[in-house]
Image (spheres, grey):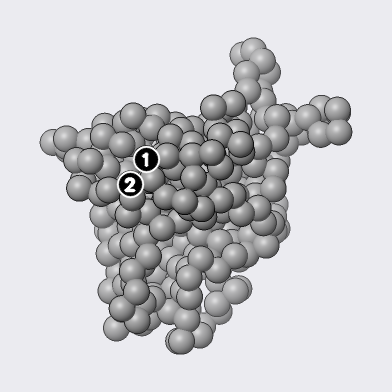
Amino acid sequence: MGDSMLDYLSIRVLAEDSVEYDSPYLGQHGISLLLTAGRNGVTYRILFDVAQDADALLVNMERMNIAPSSIDAIVISHNHYDHIGGLARITAAAKRTDLPIVVHPETFRTHFTTSPFLKHIGAPASDSPSRIEEAGGRLIFTTDPLEIMPGVETSGEIPRNTDFEDAGLSIRQIKDGHIQEDQVIDDTSLFARVRGKGTVVITGCSHAGIVNITDLAAKRWPENPIALLLGGFHLIEAGEERIEQTAAALHSAPVRRVAAGHCTGFRAQTALSRVFGPAFEPLRTGLEITLTGE
C-alpha cells in the first residue's frame, strides 16, 4: 500500500456552522471542505460538499485566496440541501469543462420530511443534473468506491453493522411512485492515506453511522491507523447512550485525532472532548489541518 499513499494532505474548512474566533469568514448551516493532496510532485484539489449558500462559500474562498478554477474535482457526500445546495453555481464559478463531480446514483431522488410539515430537503431544483452539466460539470454516478487519485478514494456505499447507529433523521423518499422510509443510502465518505501517518476519514453527515464508516476504513487498510476523523457525525439529536457508545467505539478503534462539527451537536462534541482530550477539536470555518508524510 505504500505505493498508493500521499506525501501530504491539507484540509481547509470552507463552510461550517461555526467560525473561528475573530474570523473574517461567513458561517452557514452546512459543510464544505477543500482537500489539497500531494503525491510524487502532483497536487490535486478536491472540493468535498458545497454547503447550501454559494454566495457565502464564494466569499470565504475569495478571503482564503482560493480560486474556484483551482478545483480539480468535487465529491458530494449525500443529497441534503446543506451539502449540495449551490453546486451548479460553484461548478460554473470553476469555469472548467467536464469538471468531475462524484455522486451516488440516488443523489437526485425526491427526499422529504413531513415534520413539522411537508418539505423537500434534497438537492434543490436549481441543482438538477442538467443544470450542473450545463455549468461544466461531468457527473460520475457510482455506488462503489472510486479512486480520485492514488491515496484518495470514496467509501462507496457503507455497510451498516452497528446496532446503535441509524440515519439520525425521520425522512422519506418516493421510489417507483411509492413512499418509503429513507435511510440515506447515498451517504458517502472520503478516505485518504498519508505515508507514515495513516488513514484520514472525511465525512459529511455520517448518516451511515460514524462508527460504521470508521470500521470500513480500518478494515479496508488494516495496516494503517486512523490518523484523523473529520466532519459531521450527526449526533445532534442522539440520546446519551448512543453518544457515549460512539465516543468509546471511536476511541478504541483507535482513532488518533478527531475534528467534529456541523451536525455533531454540542453534547456529542463534549463527550468526544472528554474521551479524546487534546486530540479532539471542534470543526469551524477557517480551520486548516495538514498532515505531512514521513
Determine whether, in the image, residue 71 is placed left or right of residue 150.
Answer: left
Residue density around tag 2, few if under 14, some if 14–19, many if 20 or more, within 10 Å: some
State whether residue 294 appears in this view: yes
The alpha-carbon separation of the residues under discs 1 and 2 comes to: 6 Å
Q: In this picture, is 214 found above or below 132?
A: below
133 or 3: nearer the viewer: 133
Give coordinates of residue 133: x percent, y percent: 56, 42
- Specify the quadrant of the image occupied by residue 166: top right
Q: Who's the residue at 63% across and 23% down the image?
A: 120
Q: Who's the residue at 33% across and 46% down the image?
A: 68
For disc 2, the marked residue is 68
Q: Are marks 1 and 2 in contact (CB under 8 Å)?
A: yes
For disc 1, the marked residue is 93
Q: Amino acid at mark 2?
A: Pro
Q: Amino acid at mark 1?
A: Ala
92 or 292: nearer the viewer: 92
